[in-house]
Image (cartoon, grey):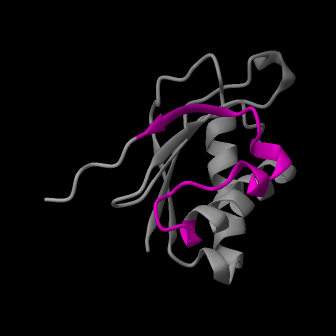
Amino acid sequence: MSVDVIVCETCRSPTPEDGEGWTGALFAALLEGVVAASPELDEVRVTTMRCLMSCRRPCAVHIRSPDRMGYVLGDLPPERTAVQALADYLASYRRSSDGVVPYKDWPEGVKGRFVARVPPLPSS
């Protein structure tokens, strides 16, 4: 089943003087590369949005899929380890029937980064 990951492209580092610039765009680019290289994530689509309104917790992403629970995560640094942790979570999310991944299966890099859980839209 297809999974959408929407990355806030305008998220900035909380300390802009560190030279990171638009960390959301960097995170999205890193995630696109990991997803493209992983056959297990073949149905995962990475897109960006100008703002997810989670400015106090950058970088923010929204994970969603039809008829499954959705999630918003924040405080994701634009680093390969964070991107890989999210990719590992996405693989578990994709395999789940309802979008609920047991806590014991969460990679360390996503623990403590969940901002919101979004119920699925009812099927019509």
Whole-percent x and y of residue 9?
55, 39
Farthest bottom residue? 39
Whole-percent x and y of residue 109?
82, 45
Whole-percent x and y of residue 93?
58, 61
Vertical relation: 15 (above or below) 6: above
Vertical relation: 98 (above or below) 18: below
Q: Is residue 1 magenta?
A: no
Q: Is residue 8 visible?
A: no
- Which one is nearer the viewer's eye here, 92 or 40? 92
Farthest left residue? 124
* Image-quadrant location for residue 114: top right
Q: Residue at x 65, y 27 (%)?
A: 58
Q: Which residues are magenta?
A: 94-118
Q: Residue at x 62, y 50 (%)?
A: 28
Q: Is residue 106 magenta?
A: yes
Q: Residue at x 20, y 59 (%)?
A: 123
Q: Is residue 83 left or right of residue 57?
A: right
